[in-house]
Image (cartoon, coloured by chain):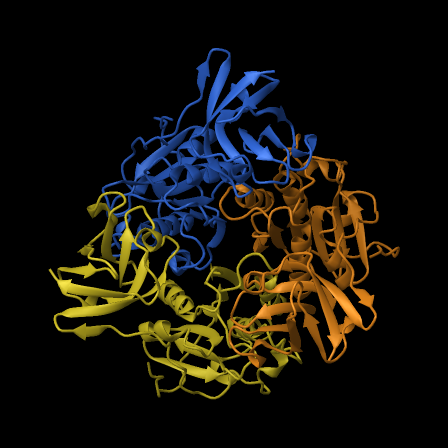
Chain colours: A yellow, B blue, C orange
Amino acid sequence: MTASTDPPALFHPCGLVTMTTDFGTTDGYVGAMKGMILNHDARLRIENIAHGIPPQNIIHGATTMSAAAPYWPKGTVHMVVVDPGVGTDRRALVAVAGGQCFVAPDNGVLGPTLDRLGPFHCHQIERNPDTEPFLPVDLAPTFHGRDLFAPIAAALASGSLSPHQTGPRYEPLPLPRPHPLRRGNRIEGTILLFDHFGNAITNLRREDLPDACAAQLPRSETVVALCRTYGEVAEGEPLALIGSDGYLEIAIRNGHAEKGLRLHVDDKIQVSES
Amino acid sequence: MTASTDPPALFHPCGLVTMTTDFGTTDGYVGAMKGMILNHDARLRIENIAHGIPPQNIIHGATTMSAAAPYWPKGTVHMVVVDPGVGTDRRALVAVAGGQCFVAPDNGVLGPTLDRLGPFHCHQIERNPDTEPFLPVDLAPTFHGRDLFAPIAAALASGSLSPHQTGPRYEPLPLPRPHPLRRGNRIEGTILLFDHFGNAITNLRREDLPDACAAQLPRSETVVALCRTYGEVAEGEPLALIGSDGYLEIAIRNGHAEKGLRLHVDDKIQVSES
Amino acid sequence: MTASTDPPALFHPCGLVTMTTDFGTTDGYVGAMKGMILNHDARLRIENIAHGIPPQNIIHGATTMSAAAPYWPKGTVHMVVVDPGVGTDRRALVAVAGGQCFVAPDNGVLGPTLDRLGPFHCHQIERNPDTEPFLPVDLAPTFHGRDLFAPIAAALASGSLSPHQTGPRYEPLPLPRPHPLRRGNRIEGTILLFDHFGNAITNLRREDLPDACAAQLPRSETVVALCRTYGEVAEGEPLALIGSDGYLEIAIRNGHAEKGLRLHVDDKIQVSES
């Protein structure tokens, strides 16, 4: 992931703002952010991507944003707030890629999305004469979602602020996550997270793998064949498949692989040609 | 449930699209679908009905859609994606009833809604010259929500596609669920699901029951009277009532009947005149 | 909390309606309410604040609304439906404060919000010639969210009904919650609720506390210092801080204080100068 050195990317806001957070749906956090956005400009339209990112789980937030962003129209502003470093000196950033704009803490949470959308520019969000009018005098040290990301996203989405006005260009931090390893004629992947259905999502992409292959599960002799869809195995049986986002998954048909196969984040999956 | 043989129903889209899914709020599934819809036409308005349908639970999804749909304006497009058969040869359908339009897998998930809204027409969604422009070249075999239902719903909601253009008319599958049984002077119902409050929702409707009656709970001597509202019993006490959607429920006032009364899906409830 | 005796407050609706409920995201309750609102006027815009308020937890609902409402534009109608008394003789109310409008059961759930937004007026919602056109003939005795609060909120948000037309002015019930106690040179607070991250939110506000202080946890010798932000302690360590909404919280940095410190609602926290 390397930011482009080309001239600043053009971004023409379409009035849409999306939210991806770990704030859940029991408290006022999401509602306060939405209020901030609509108080800036009540014509903006807010869409929830996900508020159930597991708390402080940057890899999960990054994967969720990356799975959704490619399908949105140019001109969308995406806010991603999974921010365990809030109140420390971690930076905040605005990125432009593929005609869309992203606002997030600089902790890698945008990494896979920017990799996927192609050439991008990043700007560090600063308090400067251009951003000043949109920011509270004091930011709550534990809730930059409300006091920093929401007002900046709203100003970008309404056209009151351009991405390059938020601050200097710079290189964002990469997402710290394991890479696939080649071990002899096997490829070793890692379970990054479990989705809502209990499917284990790995870091292996289709193009990393042989056409026909099988995956050996951790702490077990079980080997599951790579299938095209759930229907190729019986109900309750395990399988491997390439998920809708392009990564190898371990699943149980109409079941819960995390519980049923006792899998864990960071478990290794060995894939061999079959 | 039998589709009408009348001429094609008229449907005039109002730009609203609703979503009812079992995709949860932790991953990119819902966000990718929303992006697909707004990328087709950014003026469409998306409203979430529910994304917490228990995974693959068609009866729960059907009940949720049926409880909400009657209150929506004519011209709404409702998307219901609870789709354990994705990637098999299960069909996909568009239905028109009561001036509203529904897009869903053909697994019975629309059954109670269509029963309730009156005469309806169904069309099987095919890849044909009318639908082709809206569909990706390859559908992800595990995520028709994003690649089939969302683009078809968006095209219907924007008026780019009419329901009858999606494919031939046909009869959708019914929802497989138990029917009330009359046993002597008792009526036997079945618990279909538990709602968010832990109330047990049965398949018995008000019109199936005597005016004054009581329900015997399973594996127990407990008999609870049919009340009009929670306030008729003390806090923590069980009761039976007709829920806001017209079905007999077993509840605990300000409590959780599933846990408190150890009830299960498919448990039988015996109702007698009192 | 005392309602103002000034002339009726002006309220100019901006077309936004928010929802804060304990209805969850698995059933048709929220969807039926949204349908009712948009069936009244499809141009209204609905935003979810939170649907995951713990069932019947009025204090949690009140805290969530109070944390979000101050950030919304004038003209917003906020619906708060946490309603354990539905079907009893509890009253329903409309309140106007700070140019915003609130619709809720009269059980204290609006208390902290009205305290915070300043002078307010309340009206009891009655079936009268002005409200009659918007209400169903029979209200479902267990779901006033759909049959009473949603249609009244929609009528207020569309300008079809003014707050003072809903019924007579009166004084709403306060929120029943404990007050801080001064015990010698200590201040005793109470844990009111846990947020989504497991942080314990107390009833102590910044202005109740000495500049430098520390909090003793219940059933323990542990004393935690009041910090400004999470980053001042190591990962996994407990701390006290003033949350983004102004209340003292007990937290664990990137951890879950409720589980990690075995805290409970109604636990007492002793704060002393340090």
Identify which residue is drawn at 46% across, 36% down: B193
For the residue pair A154 and A182, the one nearer the viewer reads as A182
Location of residue B191 with respect to C166 vertically, above or below: above
Using the rendered image of the protein, determine whether residue B10 is visible from the camera's viewpoint: no
Task: Estimate the x, y position of residue C48 in percent, counting from the top left.
Answer: 57, 55
> In the picture provided, is A22 more to the left or to the right than B58?
right
Does residue A273 appear left or right of residue C61 in this picture? Answer: left
The number of discs equals: 0
In the image, A114 versus A71, the foreground residue is: A114
- The quarter holding residue B254 reads top right
Q: Residue at x 63, y 67 (%)?
A: A39
Q: The N terminus of chain A appears in which quarter of the rendering?
A: bottom left
Q: From the viewer's perspective, tell me whether residue C83 is left or right of residue A213.
A: right
Residue at the right extreme, as displayed: C5
The part of the image, by quadrant, that contains residue B125 is: top left
Q: In which quarter of the image is the C terminus of chain A?
A: bottom left
